[in-house]
Image: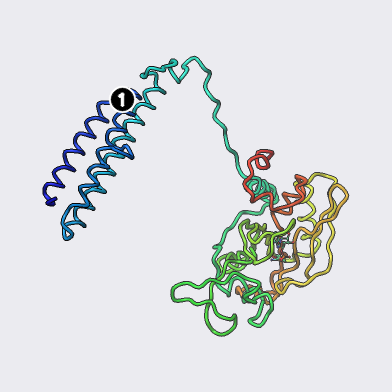
Amino acid sequence: MALPDFLATLEKLLTAAEDAFAAAGDAPTVEAARIEFLGAKSGRLKEAQKGLGTVDKADKPAAGKRFNEVKEAIDIAFQAAQDRLEQSKQTGGGAQATGPLFDTTLPGRPLRLGHLHPITQTIEHLKEIMGRLGFSAAGGPEIEDEWHNFQALNIPPAHPARDPLENFYLSTAGVTAKQPGTGAAPLLLRSQTSTVQIRVMEKTPPPVRIISLGRVYRPDTADATHYPMFHQIEGLLIDRHVTMADLKSVLRLFARSYFGGDVHIRFRPSFFPFTEPSVEVDMSWNDSWIEMGGAGMVDPHVLQAVGYDPEEVSGFAFGLGVERVCARRHNVTDIREFYKNDVRFLEQF
Ligand code: FA5
């Protein structure tokens, strides 16, 4: 068969099939049209396919392509007829109408209201408590440079805390993460909110009395008390004649306000490069002790790094884990629960 004749046959077939499926108003008519055009044994499309075998070899690709297009178009027309029937059945337009699907007499469904995440609620609560003690909130970036995350905090280049395995260093355009201390200026996701101490002191002359609450990042394996992204509350007070007694008083007041009167607080000797002396802060509530964070008197090297005179002023700083504080208060035994996004857990707060 010549190509033009074959193509003309296909066009006629397509028009007839589309008309038949468009006109079919019920299931038996659609089925009859399906058998007529798409029937596997003697459907008209099958017949047309036989003609394809008689087209000249050189014209076969063009003929085959159009055949496939026509086949697809007829399939679509059939599918559209079926969908139309199904829809009319559901909206009551068809033979098997069962009444309106939407019952306007039913009461409305109540909207579910969300609420703040427990960690956000805790952050707001901690800000409010510390605000009453005269601390105002300050912030800093989560992507930090080594000066604010380490150097100004008296953590020298060779210090193990700067190890790439202990931090999330970033590689950005123009700044390459390199082995710390090799002269490049890498950026990293801040590993502690103590960075904000530096940023505030660089800009503000003493006295300073701030807290900073925010996200920090460490490549820690997640377990019941660790998560690679967590939140810290940092406190910093710089003034004349500040002592460890002030630190302990503030932390005790803070703990009492957050947990209630029956909380106990204890300091264990510790080490942080940016405080001297340094302590770990544990809190006990409902008979068990838990490490909440670190604290200490700001090291004179840090005061010097931001241009303060250590002979004139002194101060204390502390950094507590927000997830741990929140978990302790609400008897959550695994901080990973905060980040599973399980509504059954979250809606309890
Ligand atoms: C620090 O981060 C110091 N910057 C704290 C500090 C501030 C000391 C000011 C002195 C002066 P540390 O690494 O211990 O310290 O972390 C503080 C607290 O953060 C921990 O006690 C714990 O409550 C919490 N924390 C640490 N790592 C994780 C983690 N992976 N997941 C959840 N909480 C964590």
86 is higher (above) or lower (below) than 129? above
Quadrant of residue 308 within the rendered picture: bottom right
| In this rendering, position of residue 99 left or right of residue 136 | left
Q: Nearer the viewer, residue 148 or 330?
A: 330
Q: Residue at x 75, y 64 (%)?
A: 294
| In this rendering, position of residue 341 left or right of residue 316 | left
Q: Residue at x 66, y 45 (%)?
A: 118
- The percent coordinates of residue 242 (x first, y second) are 75, 64
Quadrant of residue 56 within the rendered picture: bottom left
- For mark 1, does the 10 Å Cα neighbourhood hold few (<14), some (14 to 19), or many (20 or more) residues? some
Q: Quadrant of the C terminus?
A: top right
Residue under circle 1? 29
Question: Ligand 1, what quadrant?
Answer: bottom right
Q: Nearer the viewer, residue 12 or 164?
A: 12
Q: Nearer the viewer, residue 203 or 98?
A: 98
Q: Amino acid at mark 1?
A: Thr
Q: Residue at x 34, y 24 (%)?
A: 28
Q: Residue at x 78, y 46 (%)?
A: 331
